[in-house]
Image (tube, rainbow, N blue to C red):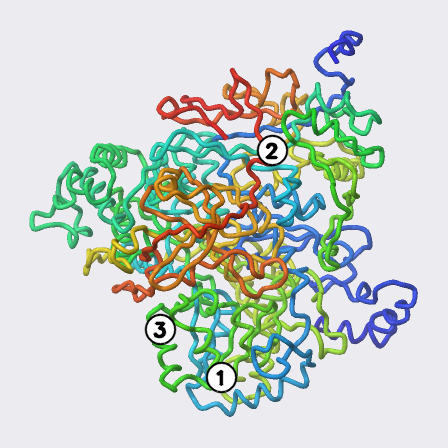
Amino acid sequence: MRQAQEEHPQDTDKPVASIGRRWGMVVDLDRCTGCQACVVACHAENNIALNLEDVVLQQRAINWIRIERYWEGEYPNVKARFLPMFCQHCNNAPCEPVCPVYATYHNQEGLNVQVYNRCIGTRYCANNCPYHARFFNFWERDLDDTHREYLNPNVTVRTKGIMEKCTFCVQRIRKSEWERRQADEELQDGDVNPACVQACPTDTLVFGNLEDEESRVAKLAQNKRHYRVLEELGTDTNVVYLKKVDPHASETAPAHA
Amino acid sequence: MRRRDVLKLAGTSGLGLGAGVAFAGCGTPDREFHIQSPVEIPEDMVTGVDTWYASICQDSGDGCGIIVRVKSGRARKIEGNPDYPLNRGKSSARAQAALQTLYNPDRIPNPMVPRGHRGSGRYRFRRWADVLPDFQEKLTAAADGSIVMITEPVNGHLAMVLERFTQSVGARWLTFEPLEQAAVRQASAKVFGTTRVPQFDIANTSYVLSIGGNFLEGGDAPVHYGQAYGHFRQGEGRSRGNFVHFDTHLTMTAANADEWHPVNPGTEGILALSIAHAALEGGAVPAALRPLANAEGTLAAYAAEQAAGVTGVPAEIIQRVGHEFAAAQTAVAMGGGSAAGHSNGLFNMSAIFALNLLKDNVGRTGGALLNAPSPLPDIPAESPVTSFQEWQEFLGEIESGQGPEVLLIHGANPVFGLPGVLNAENLLGDIPYVVSFSNVLDETTALADLILPDHHYLESWGTSIPPVGAEYATLGIQQPVIRPYHQEFDGEAGTRAFADVLLALADSIGGPLAEALPWETMRDAIRASVDELQARGDGSVISEDPESFWLTVLQRGGWWGPAEEATTAAPDLSGLPGPDAVFSSDSQEYPYHLVVTPSVLLGDGSGSLAATPWLQSTSDPMTTGVWTTWVALNPHMMADLGIQENDIVRVTSVAGSILGPAYPYPGIGEGLVSVPLGQGHRELGRYAQDRGDNALGMLAPVVQEQTGALAWSATRVRVSATGRRTRLPRIEGITAPVQMPDQQTFQITDES
């Protein structure tokens, strides 16, 4: 990966030439309450398979976004912390180079893209993802007839044997683009909101173009509380977290899962 | 022209039913041809283009405004309505999951009667025309006062229709809420002068003191408070607010507080007054709090040192919080949760709410905002609530042979929600004629002689008067966003809206009933009210033309406009503090307090939320458990009892017991047992049936003396291992978080 970048010195931190648009998200941990609205909104928008009890027990549940819960300290000085986790759309994505069939690649808008009909299900990408953001379809979809009715016609229903993960609701990006194009206009900040962002009651999640310095997401990403999860791995994610503020932080032990 | 008339016309002209039948041979489902916009402009439907309709979410309990994406005649996605004052574009997990209650494979598609005897579990579909005359005859033949209507607490037009219907046919109207909030409402009446609990303006306050208040996960408006909470933390133009929470155990709301301190169950009111004492520096209380004070007018009996022993909260914390509360520029005191479910719930809640009087914050920015009254004088903002005591009396009457002849049930599930010792199932089963309007087969509906399935709320008309504070008087309008999924092909099969059935019945019975309910359908009733709003000439929609006013109101999801000032009474804390909390049994045999925890996803188990795989499989925020019931115990207590994680334990009270896998929960003290609610359905279809256990059934029937409500926090239990093990399905552990040695995944800073 590093070598590949050296061959393109004009854009070292972005392996793919950008078109002036790099979708990204800011997650303000000080706002997140753990309410799970984003999780269900994502399931509803993206035709994600039902995580029936057996599926959960086999540890094969699919959640493109999940709320991780970390414990800190001991009773009664115990704290629970909530961290929304989903595909970080790394600019230097560990999942991309290991795919033997180029089913996952980085597009010009900064999205880490999964091409379902290329995927042959080696699951190398999932093994290589440090964020556990990739999920494998172990089963063919077996939906009740009535549960087919609400499927989103803009999103593929994945079949058995392929990987899937958060797309930043790329169908919504395309739709907003199309709508603006009808009016002969450029995309505006705030036009595109993935399902999780739209549902989130507390505005924990903010989505937009990180390359547009005027966008809300780019400004928030400069907040002094910003950090990236597992930054040491050099994944260069497009998701920026803002640290939780805790005036009593020093009084409790560090978080554990 | 009514919607149905349009269809009839379309049918005869060969476009509607005729075309449907003709095309059926080509493999196109004939239903597709009936789909039309619920607003009276069917030509707005373009194939392949999605349309969004505004409505109100009736599943989630708070009545959020929603917009629903409809494509090819099917509801595809639910979002928050960006215009609606209560939730301004945001939504909850429950609101999102309404698609699965709408397209629930186990919905009752047609009127049904049991095969053989009642409760046989086998049913026969019937046509509406075949069952309605008999139903009407039973209703008219019943003696005055021998009809009982049971519903969930409702507001808006349904409450108006129910009130008039029950009054005119001489029926009793009982409402049922499993975790009764009577203490909250009556404490609000004592302190704020209104039973509608004010909206606490946390978005603009600098200090939130919450004692048991679970406003982020339950309460009356979790989405509204979620939004305000985000602003409270990191909103622009304000400094970060401080949030201190006391509760018996670590709830989701508690987890979001800057500090959480455990408090002994039943002592929440004492804690509140102790904080008040510290806030007043031991001085005299304001006049309104005088009934709680001693002869000198102080709260010396609640001094921190004494209260610390009772409440389990260290005196220095009480002192500090009291001083912080007093010093804060603006502050609110919120309460609820298990504090309201003790036998002294009214005292607890009144003492907590009374802290607001110290800050004199009622009606002020960053304080307690009283809710605007209903914009329409004859449309109630809340329905009467039947207390547990009244429920006991009602069941007692049945037992003594003086029960009603006819029972009508809609939206409530007392067989599931009432404590098992009340024997509601058998007693309600003794009523000669039971009719349920539920569209899912729940435990109470299973007793019915006749099931007349209601539409889903996304298929029917209704209104909601949400608690949005003083700014707007609001009427949210729930309109059908799709044609009913289970349709009336010839007008005689399929589901029908509950209110419309009542209105048609009123018309058919005639007399005073028909006079009280002059509308043909609920839509007509709402239209009449909207015309009244149009005449006001102010608010969110203004139009000279009633038709365009009506359409715009529907498009925006309702009407909101300047409110008259809410009329409230002066604070009256007389009769308090009242007796101390009592518990169901002695602490020798039953050493632990049972904390029943309504799930942020499944609530208390009423309604059909448990029939949605999305909510079932979404992780509980605190334990990440899914699909079942678990027993959350302190890890040290588990070690003492020799209980391992995933051991199936039996939790026993004087009134019953439940089974569930033990979950080591770091956020609960050693004397408590926490069990989530929402599961344990014997009915309710494939996704809910026979999962976990229902802790509501094991509650001891302790009555809150001052309110008549069930003291649902007052049950004591013992815990024993069964020797069996299972695996709790949970999301935690599926994806073990990677932790780097030098860099935490979850990072914290102490500077805002």
Instruction: Look at mark 3 in the image and give the residue it sits on.
Output: B392
**Which x, y percent locates residue B464?**
51, 61
Front position among marks 1 and 2 = 2
| Mark carried by residue B406 | 1
Q: Residue furthest right?
A: B26
- Whichever of callouts 2 and 3 sits on the residue coming sooner in the sequence is 3
Give the amino acid at mark 1: Val
Category of crowding for the residue at label 2, using alpha-carbon neighbours closer than 10 angstroms: few (below 14), some (14–19), many (at least 20): some
Query: The numbered mark 3 sits on a residue in which chain?
Result: B
Residue at 60% across / 36% down in the picture?
B734
Instruction: Look at mark 2 in the image and give the residue it sits on.
Output: B735
> As displayed, is residue A142 above or below residue B428?
above
Give yes or no for contact between labels 1 and 2 (Cβ–Cβ under 8 Å).
Answer: no
> As displayed, is residue B549 above or below residue B163?
above
Left or right placement of residue A113 versus residue B340 in this view: right
Q: Nearer the viewer, residue B57 or A85?
A: A85
Quadrant of res B549: bottom right
Labels in figure, total: 3
Q: Nearer the viewer, residue B134 or B353?
A: B134
Q: Is residue B294 visible?
A: yes
Q: Judging from the image, what secondary structure is the residue with disc 2 in? A: loop
